[in-house]
Every structure is written in structure tokens, then in C-alpha cells.
Amino acid sequence: MNELIEAAAQAVGEARAKKPLAPAITNVITVDFVVNAQLAVGGSGAVTYLADEISPLASVSGALYINMGSLLPVHEAAVPAAIKSCAASGVPWVLDPVGIGLGNMRIGLYGQMRQFPPAIIRCNASEAIALAETWELDAGISGGSVRGVDSTDTVAAARGAAIALARFTHGAVAVSGDADLVTDGASVARVGGGSPLFTAVTGSGCSLGGVCAVYASVAEPFAAAVAASSAYAVAGERAAQESRGPASFKVAFLDELYRIVPADIAAADIVVEEA
């Protein structure tokens, strides 16, 4: 078995055994889905928006998740406090760059993140391209366009941006799409599976970021991101077979995510190649 896939499979088992705390500053629209997905894979979640709460919480956590959707004024203090606390404590954090390019507060926060970069970036293709441009990285691409929270670019088009981001952060980047692309800047893993119904359920990507944080608590960033993407692909494919639409899919998906074991990751549709 490929060493990366083996490490990803091991992360699934480690998370269930250790039940790591992976708190979040996350999108208010999808809090329920994020925390329930974290619980389903064996982690423990907590959500806060206050700077004086997130700093001590981050310092005792396995990893932290920051989702930039539906920002409130309080985030202007809470987000910098969180990432600085993680940097000081050596705690990995996961970024979901929702809404990148919208508003001055987001622009300022993304600028600060460049100094204290995340261990994992979980995004769609357009967000990967836009973040690489925001951080002025040489990715050989341009023109990433985000329509609200949706991507207008393909995963293939974001390959250069994802690799550039991973090399800059010395972490991993997971780009969601029909087939996910996960990279550490040196290697690229392509993860197949999943279901089109993910796009019909709000919070699918947000909850994936939360699960990345759970696995980042027990594994290196690349293995953690591959574990999360693969778990979602397998659980999503299984859930779609027994669903009649988005509502039943969401319920079935959480059930299938709860049932994921290391052997499922070892047998998943994952192809690893050089970047």
C-alpha cells in the first residue's frame, strides 16, 4: 500500500481512538453539519466567535478550523487571535477561504493569515486560485472567479494554485470537485467517488473542513487531508445509493461517515502522482 494512503487510513483509526478536540470558528449557516460530521468521525467539536475564548481553546486543542463564511464584526478580532494562538502553541489549523475577495475585512484577515499560514487549506477550485493570487504566489494561473460560495473553475485549472499554496504553507491543500485534488506541493493525490448530491446540501464543504481538522489532530497535514477527502468520497457514494434526494442524502451521509473505518480508506479510489 502507498505510504500516504496507509497514513490516511491510520488517521481514521487514530481519530476514533483518541477523540481529539477540534474547535471551530465557522459559518453560522452550517454549524450543525460541521460539528455532527466531526462527531461522526470520532472527533469532538466546539464553536466560538470570541477572541478571549478561542485563544485558550485553540492552545489546548488538537487542531482548529476556521471557515470564513458569514463573517461578523467579532471575527475581526477572533480570527487573528486564533491563528496567533495556534502559531504560538504549535497547533495546526485548517482554513476554508469562503468568500475570498469580498469586503475589506476579509482582505485584511487573509493578509494576516499569510504570516501565520494554515496546515491545511480546504477549498473549491476558484478559491484556491483566488487565495494564491491574494498571497501573490507564482502559480502560473490567473482569473479565479468565485460566485458566492460556488466555484466557476475546474479542479484541473486549480492544480498549479494548489501546489503553490501547499509549498508556501508547507502543509496541504484539498480542492473539492467531481474528483478531489489533494497536494503537499511535492505529490498530488486524486480522490474519486462522492456524489453530485453534495452540491445540493449546504455545508458539505464546510463540514469537510471540520473533519480535516479532526484528522489533522492525529496525522500530518497531507495524510489528514487525504483521509478526510477519501472518507467523504466513500461515505457520499454509499449514501447516494440509498437516498431519494438532498434531505435523505444528508442523513444517510452522516450515518455512512460514522461507519467509515481504516480499511475503507485503504480501498478508496486514490491515485498518487508527482506534482
Image (spheres, grey):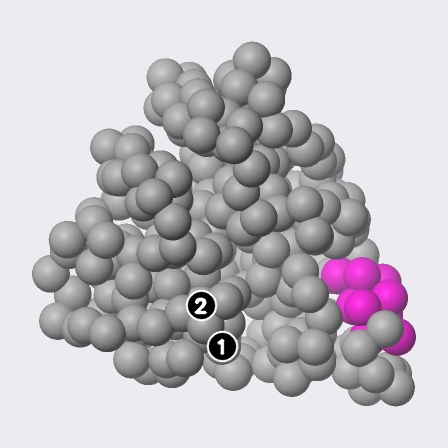
Q: Is residue 251 found inside the magenta-colored segment of the image?
A: yes
Task: Specify the quadrant of the image occupied by residue 188.
Answer: bottom left
> In screen coordinates, is 76 left or right of 112?
right
> In screen coordinates, is 12 left or right of 176?
right
- Which amino acid, mark 2? Asn
Q: Is residue 96 found inside the magenta-colored segment of the image?
A: no
Q: Name the residue nearer the viewer: 121 or 6.
A: 121
Question: What is the crowding at mark 2: few (fewer than 14 residues within 10 Å), some, or many (at least 20)?
Answer: many
Task: Please state the extent of the stretch shown in magenta in the rendering.
Answer: 248-257
> In screen coordinates, is 143 left or right of 252?
left
Task: Specify the quadrant of the image occupied by residue 196.
Answer: bottom right
Q: Is residue 132 visible?
A: yes
Could you tell me what secondary structure mostly forms the magenta stretch? helix
139 lies above or below 17: below
> In screen coordinates, is 46 left or right of 148?
right
Residue lying at 23% horizontally and 53% vertically, measured from the top left? 134
Residue lying at 49% horizontally and 77% vertically, measured from the top left? 177
Q: What whole-number distance in Å separates the C-alpha atoms at marks 2 and 1? A: 7 Å
Disc 1 target residue: 177
Residue lying at 23% horizontally and 74% vertically, measured from the top left? 143
Disc 2 target residue: 124
